[in-house]
Amino acid sequence: MNKAVTRGVGYADLHDHIAALDAAGLLYRIDEPVNKDTELHPLVRWQFRGGIAEPDRKAFLFTNVVDGSGRRYDIPLIVGGIAANPEIYRIGMNVPTREEIGPAWERAIANPIPPRVVETGPVQDIVVTGDALRGPGNGMESLPVPISTPGFDAAPFLTMTGVITRDPVTGVQNMGTYRGHLKGPTHLGCMMLANLRSGGLEHWRKYKERGERMPIAILLGAPPLVTFQGPQKLPLGFDELSVAGGLAGVPIDVVKGRTVDLLVPARAEIVVEGYVDTEYLEPEGPFGESHGYVALEDYNMIIEVTAITRRRDAVMTSIISQVTPSESSVVKRLAYEPMYLSHLRDRLGIHGLTRVALHEPLTNLRRFVFLQFKTGTARSEIWRALEGALALQAAIGKFVVAIDEDIDPDNADAVFWAMSYRCNPVEDTRVVPHREPGHGPRTEGTPLVDSAMLIDATMKSPMPPLALPKREYMERAKILWERLGLPGLRPETPWHGYSLGDWTEEWDENARLAAEGRWMERSGAYAQRRRAGIEPNISVRSVEDRDDG
Ligand SMILES: Cc1cc2nc3c(=O)[nH]c(=O)nc-3n(C[C@H](O)[C@H](O)[C@H](O)COP(=O)(O)O)c2cc1C
């Protein structure tokens, strides 16, 4: 468990989290000046494109952020601190193992704890409003906001945000992660996607109907349990801060915003307060998107910043997104996979489903969904799951593939292997029309309506064993390999043969005798079973079964 929990409040703030990452050897502290507009994100990007294994990816804490004009920022910036790898996320979730992440989400969603309003909090140690926000170097310009994709992005963008808005009718707050385009000291763009059913956009529409501007508060760094709520897809009308309380087991302390009637976490690092215009929109972007392509300019929302509040020791958070794997895909994957498993297994009651995996590298989670089943699961259950997987979110599930439990869904080669030998496309696939195109690059040819393909790549009947030496032989050979001082091995699944149901005791006995060097003992038995009048390549069983009667 994470021992570094903010004194007395029961959940870690970002400073506790950074200390826990450091203690776990998961933090690089970079004290030399790094240019936020040209060097910072490209440096951390190498972690995801440089052949570094997922467990070896770490958080980067930049303590000396500068820009091209030589300006130094007094706020450190953390990148990768939320989810450079699953272990970093696990530490933030304060659960003992990765397997506990899903159940922790399920418990918190089922048992939310509403936030507790307190009078003051460190997030308002420093409050900047009015004229102090304006002019060069002030307001948004005072924050070390990096450029994520230099060469393509139009400006520095806020990335790891917690954007809080309130339903003007019900009064329930929503928090989502939406990007913010820096345009001036008090001038921001914001994109809330319709195809992802963004909660903030639903609120904006309601304010627009009333002819009112929308109050907004943007968290830039917060206790990890709060930050994790931003990308989590909860039903609209669910206050994410209550789910954060459910994860913490205690209410999240919140304070009133200084210039907006919204509640913000008292232990957040930085909060940008403001109002969203509901009449005018402005060009926003280009920005490198989480689907891996650059999102081109769209008309999007305009925010007028009215306050920036912060802790005295604030640390700002930015996230690596764009081409996957990325920090953004890790954070979403760890939140979405358990939600899909619980939707299919617990809510739809599908028997035999053991795992849901969203494919991450380059495809960005939403396109390929792999459903893993126990061997022998009824086909009716497999098809119920394939169809059910399309139902939870409009944007997830373009290719949904059912696989057996011996197929590793984290290895796309293994999934192709299952599709190659366990699927007859004419019987085992179905194309479903009328799907939303979802979150992807916009091109002139992008159809307004997409479709999905469901693929059953599970075994339909017993299959012969996998043709690798049985486990015991491979294990003994590994000992020999190591004794001979051959290069280090990294076993890849499958690394040994196993039965897939079509195998007899007799064949097992043959193989055992063969391995003992006694294969010649069967010579007489083969001779006794000779047959005339048949063609080569005919199965022994079919001939002998026919002869038997
Ligand atoms: C790093 C990151 C950036 C994101 N940026 C946006 C964005 O700019 N606009 C958007 O609508 N969704 C964005 N998303 C996805 C939303 O956060 C996600 O759909 C979430 O469920 C939104 O919360 P909501 O369901 O309360 O709207 C982003 C997610 C991550 C992890």
Image (cartoon, grey):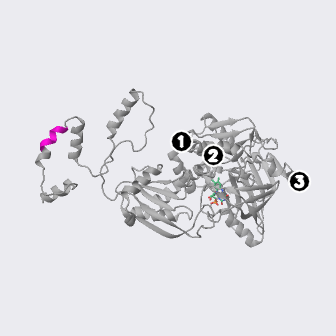
Amino acid bearing label 1: Pro
Amino acid bearing label 2: Ile
**Which quadrant does the C terminus fall into?**
bottom left
Kindly report the distance in space between the C-alpha atoms of the residues bearing marks 3 and 1: 48 Å
User: x%, y% of residue 223?
Assistant: 67, 46
Residue 384, by quadrant, is bottom left
User: x%, y% of residue 149?
Assistant: 69, 50
Of the pair 342 and 38, the residue shown nearer to us: 38
Position of residue 396 relative to residue 325, above or below, is below
Q: Are marks 2 and 3 in contact (CB under 8 Å)?
A: no
Kindly report the distance in space between the C-alpha atoms of the residues bearing marks 2 and 3: 34 Å
- Circle on res. 82: 2
Tell me the crowding category of disc 3: few under 14, some 14 to 19, or many 20 or more residues within 10 angstroms, Cα based. few
Please state which of the two labelled residues, at mark 3 or mark 1, is closer to the viewer. Answer: 3
User: Tag 2's secondary structure?
Assistant: loop
User: x%, y% of residue 194?
Assistant: 64, 65
Kindly report the distance in space between the C-alpha atoms of the residues bearing marks 1 and 2: 17 Å
**Which quadrant does the N terminus fall into?**
top right
Whether residue 520 appears in magenta in the rendering, the answer is: yes
| Left or right, residue 229 beside residue 487 | right
Task: Say which label, 3 or 1, has the lower sequence index.
Answer: 1
User: Tag 1's secondary structure?
Assistant: loop
Residue 288, by quadrant, is bottom right
Q: Are marks 1 and 2 in contact (CB under 8 Å)?
A: no
User: Tag 3's secondary structure?
Assistant: helix
Q: Name the residue beneath numbered marker 3.
A: 131
Q: Is residue 353 visible to the viewer in this orientation of the structure?
A: no
Q: Main secondary structure of the magenta part?
A: helix
Q: Name the residue beneath numbered marker 1.
A: 96
**Region in magenta:** 519-524
Q: Ligand 1 falls in which quarter? A: bottom right
